[in-house]
Image (spheres, rainbow, N blue to C red):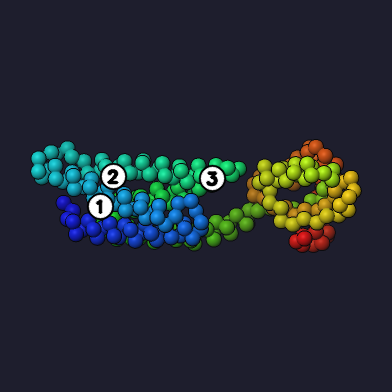
Amino acid sequence: MITTEESIIRLCIALVLGAVIGYERQAQNKSAGLRTHTLVCIGSCLCMIVSVNVAMSYYFGYGYHNSDPERIAAQVVSGVGFLGAGTILANQKARNVQGLTTAATIWVVAAVGLVTGAGYLAVAIVATVLIFLVLTVFIRVDTLLTERCRKYYILQVAMKNTVGQSRRMTAFFAEEKINVESFQALSGEEGPLAEFTVRISYIGRLQESDIIGKLLALKGVSKAEIVPEETKESAAGPQ
């Protein structure tokens, strides 16, 4: 059986380990931060302690040989999924799925709490260090790999000079997940046509011919082409 003193020590360690991970999420301004991760870790640790003690007490007190110390703890793994789903649904207004990392963090923090409650303190500490490294160091690696896969183009576009047309163009870039890096107007503000160059970047399989084709298919767009390499420097600067 896990004594009261051992239980308190394990709960305190779970508090510290959960707080370490929660602090990183809080610093990134995520929907689940310091308190959420700490509570999940303490709660799962407590469930593990109770699960072990109940199974052991029934075994030694009543002679039940089929008592399972994993039964309560197993429900934590599935139950914590509701919290993870909540962090994803909190971002449902965005066009892309967000909150997956925080949801995975909540799930793995619950696992850390279970391991702590089971008494594998060294494993729990090492797991926490590895999780913290993934959240802090791997994000830089992820950013580096993302930038290596990012494509850049400079487009010259002519379209109707109306507010509705501008909104249509903005919606096109948003739907295709294309980032507008810089923009330069080439025509006057009062003319019937708006002509401009725009530097874009994106990640994916979309080719430059696909971008041009989709732009020309937009209502009100009369011209869309890739700017030649020698003119990129004049168009790339921020306006």
> Which one is earlier in the sequence, the residue at label 3 or at label 1?
3
SS of the residue under disc 1: helix
Towards the viewer: 203 or 52: 52
Towards the viewer: 140 or 100: 100
Q: Amino acid at mark 2?
A: Ala
Q: Amino acid at mark 1?
A: Ala
Give coordinates of residue 100: x percent, y percent: 49, 47
Q: Is residue 216 above or below residue 200?
A: above
Identify the image quadrant of the C terminus: bottom right
Q: Amino acid at mark 3?
A: Asn
> Which one is earlier in the sequence, the residue at label 2 or at label 3?
2
Would you name the residue on which mark 1 appears? 118
Give coordinates of residue 161: x percent, y percent: 84, 45
Give coordinates of residue 46: x percent, y percent: 27, 50
Q: Quadrant of residue 183?
A: bottom right
The local crowd at label 2, few if under 14, some if 14 to 19, many if 20 or more residues have their Cα within 10 Å, is: many
The local crowd at label 3, few if under 14, some if 14 to 19, many if 20 or more residues have their Cα within 10 Å, is: some
Would you name the residue on which mark 3 appears? 91
> Which one is earlier in the sequence, the residue at label 1 or at label 2?
2
Using the image, tell me which numbered label, if any, was put on residue 73: 2
- Between circles 3 and 1, the one closer to the viewer is 3
Q: Quadrant of residue 21?
A: bottom left
Q: Residue at x 80, y 37 (%)?
A: 219
Asked if disc 1 and disc 2 are in contact, CB closer than 8 Å, the reply is yes
- Between circles 2 and 3, the one closer to the viewer is 3
In this view of the protein, can residue 213 be seen by the observer?
no
Mark 3–mark 1 Cα distance, whole angstroms, equals 34 Å
